[in-house]
Amino acid sequence: MAKVKISAAPSIRRLPSYLHIIRRLQGEGNTFISGTVIAQELNLEPIQVRKDLSITGIIGRPKKGYPIQALIEAIEHFLGWDSPHDAVLVGAGSLGTALLGYGEFRYHGLRIVAAFDKNPQKIGSDIHGVTVFDNVNMEERIRSLEVTTAILTVPSVHAQETAGILVRAGIRGIWNFTNVKLKVPERVVVQKEDLSSGYAMFCVMLHAKKLEEDGRHGAGQD
Amino acid sequence: MAKVKISAAPSIRRLPSYLHIIRRLQGEGNTFISGTVIAQELNLEPIQVRKDLSITGIIGRPKKGYPIQALIEAIEHFLGWDSPHDAVLVGAGSLGTALLGYGEFRYHGLRIVAAFDKNPQKIGSDIHGVTVFDNVNMEERIRSLEVTTAILTVPSVHAQETAGILVRAGIRGIWNFTNVKLKVPERVVVQKEDLSSGYAMFCVMLHAKKLEEDGRHGAGQD
């Protein structure tokens, strides 16, 4: 059971926010950036920033920091965002539509080349520049497009059945926005995007902040 | 600068997926569940599952595992999902519409009580049972609703300006779906939901899987 192990997951998750800040600072005319500046922008510890960036293979220079252009290239190369990556999107409902219009993706090399839906009113239409096809012929169409990555935004009740079709069509990676834990062959990578996880963090942070404020007020009354 | 520190973030992020599995197994008639079964369902190590669940204060019994009902209650209580939590949503575009229709939220106690938009065609309409109001009167309306949590799904270019209005309206927590790092007073909690982070993980996993498969094929040819 060879399972892909990603040890540096939290670091990898932070790389896009680094890229965002660094690009902005480059746009403002900077050629070098220090880990401390990035840390301040993102409310992180400088040592954490340096550790995270080191996974891309780049090392900052004492006092000067990182050369911006090389840093951008190192992060993009590490993430594979320096070459185009084609994908199809299945399920052109409101979440699918939101993803089709998500402007940030073009910075990541992600090109959604086709969308699929079963709604006759959507089939043949164009959403944010992407054509919506009938999902009845999805398997053949994906094969002919030679695309191996899919974004899954169908209602959860159709998730497993749709994943089966995608796998038969040659899809090797599914970015899964449904709340179903998909059963797929071992060769297929599934990245599950779970809004509930983010909401859980939000709730715990709100609660911690409330306790902190209560504590401060309590202390003030002594 | 007292900043809320959440040390157990990855564990917290996994709790909703535990809850999902446990509820399903309860629905199938089980009254106890072992950490090993949960681990198998989610492709995790049993020791990780036991460690994650321990943050809610619950301890499994040797051989029997966890009493399901008590486990559900412990997780929900830890996350604050056992009491209703009202929020407003600002920006009823496609992502906002997707969130208004996200059925899972009702299991988390999250009730979206009002939405705001500036599009005249949306104002006064009802999206998945939630009324869309004009964002011109947003500050007063949020005050009168006495809601302190907001979900921000406006275009990124309006994010900071909108956050300012939310803070003046008494909002203490913002679930931020824009790609802007919001500047808010220290008393306000911001949880940033970043699709790019998930996509970064997905790309690295695809790459790791490809290297693994290439390695296997290479070995086979020797």
Image (tube, coloured by chain):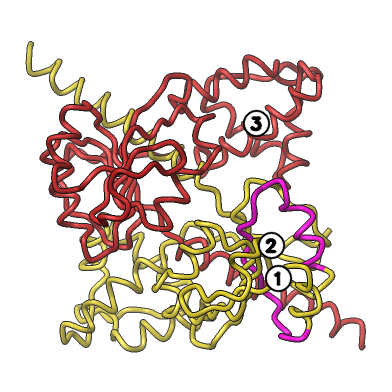
Chain colours: A yellow, B red
Q: In this picture, is A180 found above or below A99?
A: above
Return the residue found at the far left. Answer: A221
- Looking at the picture, do discs 3 and 1 lie on one chain? no
Total of numbered circles in the picture? 3
- In the image, what residue occupies the spot 75% across and 80% down? A141
Q: In this picture, is A209 found above or below A11?
A: above
Distance from Cα at disc 3 to Cα at disc 2: 42 Å
- Asked if residue A60 lies in the magenta stretch, the reply is no
Check disc 2 and report the residue beneath it: A118
Distance from Cα at disc 1 to Cα at disc 2: 6 Å
Tag in front: 3 or 1: 1
Q: Residues within 10 Å of mark 2 (few under 14, many from 20)?
A: some
Q: Look at the numbered discs 1 and 2 and tell me whether their residues touch, using CB distance below 8 Å.
A: yes
Distance from Cα at disc 3 to Cα at disc 1: 45 Å
Q: Amino acid at mark 1?
A: Asp
Q: In this picture, is B71 found above or below B154?
A: above
* Visible residue check, residue B86: yes
**Which of the 4 quarters of the picture holds residue B133?**
top left
Relative depth, front residue between B87 and B41:
B87
Q: Which residues are magenta?
A: A144-167
Check disc 1 and report the residue beneath it: A134
Task: State left or right for residue B123 relative to residue A109.
Answer: left
**Which of the 4 quarters of the picture holds residue A106?**
bottom left
Element under disc 1: strand
